[in-house]
Image (cartoon, rainbow, N blue to C red):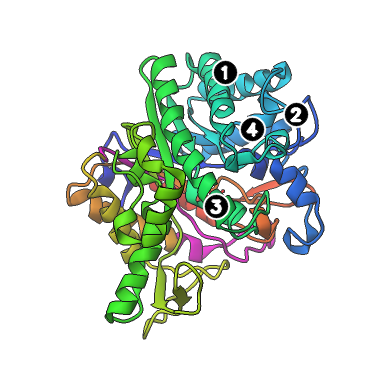
């Protein structure tokens, strides 16, 4: 049986969440609208037309929620700052109530002995900035930098652990290429400029934190998925390589000073020429103290000439019947181990934290209990794979479970339950699931 102590006394155990998904109070206390407020209000964008507000009403219940983090035995709470709560228009006038809210939240963490890990951008761009083009616009970098400076100066005395961006591939692809997340834009002419400005933002955000915050620990997070070719044919192998460039390498390599992975995908070469990104290689570079990896599934891909641009298609893994979560995501801890190793192989990756990992199931509250044995099995499998990678010498220093409580799961609305704590979305009552109690025991041993 694997124990928390197997990871060593210095290992950081935490639980993660994000502003949009939990806070509520979306248009209160001076907060301006974010792209997620706008997107979720449109009919047909969120499953069953779920309304975003009040989500978990964390804004009013953060004291009891931090008490839950503590009760479960975690030392770290990772949360994000809603940009439009600080700057309702994205730039310009600062909302003092918003500033105060995050002071109170940070102070409450510290009072309860919980270390805050603060994400600066977890997908909720102020709508006012989206109206100017959002991440596709060149002007986004200056305003993002100004937002980072405000947060660093305001909270830097108390917060030492910062995450610049949450999953840049997540929001640029889902929000600016496929249109299934906010702001709902599509096509490469939106995706590529969003990618470029995001790659600049991750490095420049890091540089600002380094300059403004003493004794700071700076990271940024990446979604990662092992990409497996369907067969060993050259076509499938090359297709897998292209998808790997897109899903795994697109943001970590510019931060390493390597630029975009143009050599393995000619479309990126064209993007580089068109936008002159090679000239920005130095600006995109930053020496992060740690990188956060977030893993949910592997992907098997097959060559398909009819798919524009990427010429690859996701298929069911050959001969492998793996179990899936309620999101339809394959449970495969070996692929988690492999992708962690892939990221660890970059020469400048010094330190890896798993900043999200978890699973959604169709949890039911019955007689006051949520018996989520599958989620416990999931964590056991993934933690064993992580320990294996760590024991092989990879510098893995922390793990954060996704997520504290069931919350607003983006386009899935409230249907996908990832929490260690069950949220009744009518009464907003929280109930610790069996997996929450499992963590409590695990972290004691
Ligand atoms: C995001 C979370 C999300 C989770 C599960 C990650 O991509 O950072 O906000 O809830 O995946 O889908």
**Residues packed near mark 3 inside 10 Å, few (<14), some (14 to 19) or many (20 plus):** many
**Cα gap from disc 2 to disc 1, whole angstroms:** 16 Å
- Residue at the image position 26 percent from the left and 54 percent from the top: 341
Name above or below for residue 316 compared with residue 51.
Answer: below
> Which dot, 3 or 4, sits closer to the camera?
3
Which one is in front, 405 or 298? 298
> Which dot, 4 or 1, sits closer to the camera?
1
Q: Is residue 1 visible?
A: no
Report the residue marked by disc 4. 82
- Residue at the image position 39 percent from the left and 29 percent from the top: 218
- Residue at the image position 54 percent from the left and 71 percent from the top: 328
Asked whether the beta carbons under mark 2 and mark 4 sit within 8 Å of each other, the answer is yes
Farthest residue toward the left?
392
Magenta highlight on residue 357: yes
Magenta residues, dominant SS class: loop
Farthest residue toward the bottom?
319
Report the residue marked by disc 3. 191
Q: Secondary structure at mark 1?
A: helix
Q: Is mark 2 within 8 Å of ligand 1?
A: no
Q: Secondary structure at mark 3?
A: helix
Q: In which quarter of the view is residue 87 placed?
A: top right
**Is 345 positioned to the left or the right of 29 in the image?**
left
| Quadrant (top left/top right/bottom left/bottom right) for the C terminus | top left
Q: Name which of mark 2 and mark 4 comes first in the sequence.
A: 2
Tag count in the figure? 4
Magenta stretch in the rendered image? 349-376
Question: Percent position (x, y) of residue 167?
Answer: 48, 47
**Cα gap from disc 3 to disc 4, whole angstroms:** 23 Å
Marking on residue 150? 1
């Amino acid at each position: 049986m694997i124990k928390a102590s197997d990871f060593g006394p210095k290992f950081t155990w935490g639980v993660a969440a994000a502003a949009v998904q939990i806070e509520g109070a979306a248009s209160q206390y001076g907060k301006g609208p974010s792209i997620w407020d706008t997107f979720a209000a449109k009919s047909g964008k969120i499953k069953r037309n779920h309304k975003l507000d009040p989500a978990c009403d964390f804004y009013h219940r953060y004291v009891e929620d931090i008490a839950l983090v503590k009760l479960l035995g975690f030392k770290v709470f990772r949360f994000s700052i809603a940009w439009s709560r600080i700057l309702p228009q994205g730039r310009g006038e600062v909302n003092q109530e918003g500033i105060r809210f995050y002071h109170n939240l940070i102070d409450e963490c510290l009072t309860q002995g919980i270390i805050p890990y603060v994400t600066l951008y977890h997908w909720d761009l102020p709508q006012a900035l989206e109206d100017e083009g959002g991440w596709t616009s060149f002007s986004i970098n200056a305003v993002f930098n100004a937002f980072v400076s405000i947060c660093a100066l305001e909270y830097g005395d108390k917060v030492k652990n910062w995450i610049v961006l949450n999953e840049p591939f997540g929001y640029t692809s889902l929000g600016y290429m496929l249109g299934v997340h906010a702001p709902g834009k599509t096509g490469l002419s939106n995706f590529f400029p969003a990618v470029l400005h995001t790659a600049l933002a991750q490095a420049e955000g890091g540089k600002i934190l380094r300059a403004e915050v003493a004794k700071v620990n700076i990271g940024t997070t990446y979604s990662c998925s092992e990409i497996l070719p369907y067969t060993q044919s050259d076509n499938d192998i090359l297709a897998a390589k292209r998808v790997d460039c897109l899903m795994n390498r697109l943001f970590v390599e510019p931060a390493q000073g390597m630029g975009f992975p143009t050599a393995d995908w000619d479309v990126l070469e064209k993007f580089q020429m068109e936008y002159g990104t090679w000239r920005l290689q130095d600006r995109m570079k930053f020496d992060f103290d740690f990188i956060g990896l977030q893993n949910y599934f592997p992907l098997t891909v097959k060559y398909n000439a009819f798919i524009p641009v990427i010429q690859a298609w996701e298929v069911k893994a050959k001969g492998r019947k793996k179990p899936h979560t309620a999101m339809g995501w394959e449970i495969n801890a070996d692929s988690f181990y492999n992708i962690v190793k892939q990221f660890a192989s970059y020469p400048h990756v010094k330190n890896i934290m798993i900043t999200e990992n978890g699973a959604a199931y169709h949890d039911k509250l019955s007689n006051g209990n949520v018996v989520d044995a599958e989620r416990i099995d999931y964590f056991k499998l993934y933690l064993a794979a992580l320990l294996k990678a760590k024991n092989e010498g990879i510098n893995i220093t922390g793990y954060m479970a996704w997520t504290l409580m069931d919350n607003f799961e983006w386009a899935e609305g409230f249907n996908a339950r990832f929490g260690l704590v069950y949220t009744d979305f009518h009464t907003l009552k929280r109930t610790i699931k069996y997996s929450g109690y499992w963590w409590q025991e695990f972290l004691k041993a």
